[in-house]
Image (tube, helix red, strand yellow):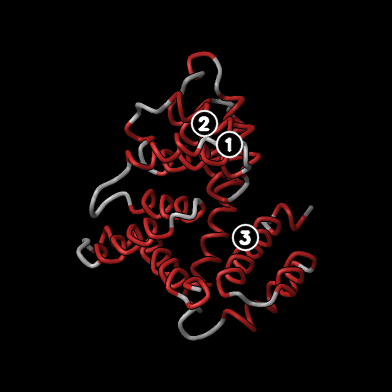
């Protein structure tokens, strides 16, 4: 209990997430994942030393650790704040912190129990629930929440993308594609277009997907510095998908 009270639990979970994600992205051995899961502290330390630490990545690890510690402290503070005063705002601030830190089930519980009375159709909560439900594969619930906030401008970002993806997950491919097609435009909607490309690949429409990925890559250099920071992940992912499509194994 002493270590739990001093954020040990949150820090270890955060370390595991960092190491497993890094392991999957780098394609390192599966044995590392088992070591990280079953021997959390020892496994994470060993993985960081052997696979992550180098001159270019030390700052990234330090930043990640700082974020984990900050998030743990923020969650503890918000938990105490809610214990002292159980208000709608305090509940949602804690739920948002849980969702950001990866404690999705805890976030869902708080969001769902907060949708009562004057707040039963609260748009912020419903938009957050679209993300939370999708993360735990409750696709029908994600769709129901999305429909309630479909006309809210704040929904038409990440939430709208998840709505289209959730439709595909339940077998509504035509409806999913219709939603993807509403999120088009040069120099914009990079996340939606990237996910649409993956959707097309899964439907064996590789040529159409290739065009979308090429457009993303070609448009990236024309973005502002701010836009590049926000969309670099989709640019990098699009390049990776193009490499897969153009690889000899794919061509054959």
Name the front one of labels 3 and 2.
2
Q: For the residue labelled by badge 2, is the local secondary structure a helix, a strand or a loop?
A: helix
SS at mark 3 in the image: helix
The structure residue drawn at horizontal position 80% and vertical position 65%, both measured from the top left corner, is 38
**Mark 1 touches mark 2? (CB < 8 Å):** yes
Task: Give the labeled residue for mark 1.
Answer: 170
The residue shown at (70%, 79%) is: 46
Image coords of residue 123 (percent x, y): 43, 27
Counting residues from the start of the chain, the first of labels 3 and 1 encountered is 3
Q: Quarter-wise, where is residue 124 in the image? A: top left
Residue 83, can we see it?
Answer: no
- Residue identified by numbered label 2: 143
Work out how far the residue at label 1 is from the one at label 2, CA to CA, in angstroms.
Answer: 10 Å
Nearest the camera: 106 or 171?
A: 171
Report whether 58 appears left or right of 180: right
Residue plotted at (47% across, 72% down): 251
Residue 149 in view: yes
């Amino acid at each position: 209990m002493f270590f739990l009270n001093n954020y040990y639990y949150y820090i270890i979970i955060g370390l595991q997430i960092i190491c497993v994600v890094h392991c999957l992205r780098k394609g390192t051995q599966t044995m590392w994942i088992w070591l990280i899961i079953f021997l959390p502290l020892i496994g994470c330390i060993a993985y960081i030393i052997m696979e992550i630490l180098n001159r270019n990545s030390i700052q990234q690890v330090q930043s990640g650790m700082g974020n984990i510690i900050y998030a743990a402290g923020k969650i503890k503070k918000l938990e105490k704040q809610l214990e002292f005063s159980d208000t709608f705002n305090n509940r949602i601030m804690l739920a948002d912190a849980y969702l950001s830190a990866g404690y999705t089930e805890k976030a869902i519980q708080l969001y769902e129990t907060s949708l009562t009375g004057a707040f039963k159709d609260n748009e912020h909560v419903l938009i957050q629930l679209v993300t939370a439900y999708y993360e735990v594969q409750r696709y029908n619930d994600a769709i129901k929440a999305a429909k309630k906030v479909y006309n809210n401008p704040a929904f038409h970002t990440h939430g709208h993308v998840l709505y289209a993806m959730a439709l595909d997950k339940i077998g509504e491919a035509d409806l999913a594609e219709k939603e993807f097609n509403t999120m088009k435009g040069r120099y914009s909607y990079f996340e939606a277009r990237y996910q649409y490309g993956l959707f097309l690949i899964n439907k064996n429409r590789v040529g159409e997907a290739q065009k979308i990925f090429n457009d993303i890559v070609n448009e990236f250099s024309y973005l502002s510095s701010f836009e590049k920071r926000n969309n670099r992940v989709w640019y990098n992912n699009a390049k990776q998908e193009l490499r897969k499509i153009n690889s000899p194994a794919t061509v054959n």
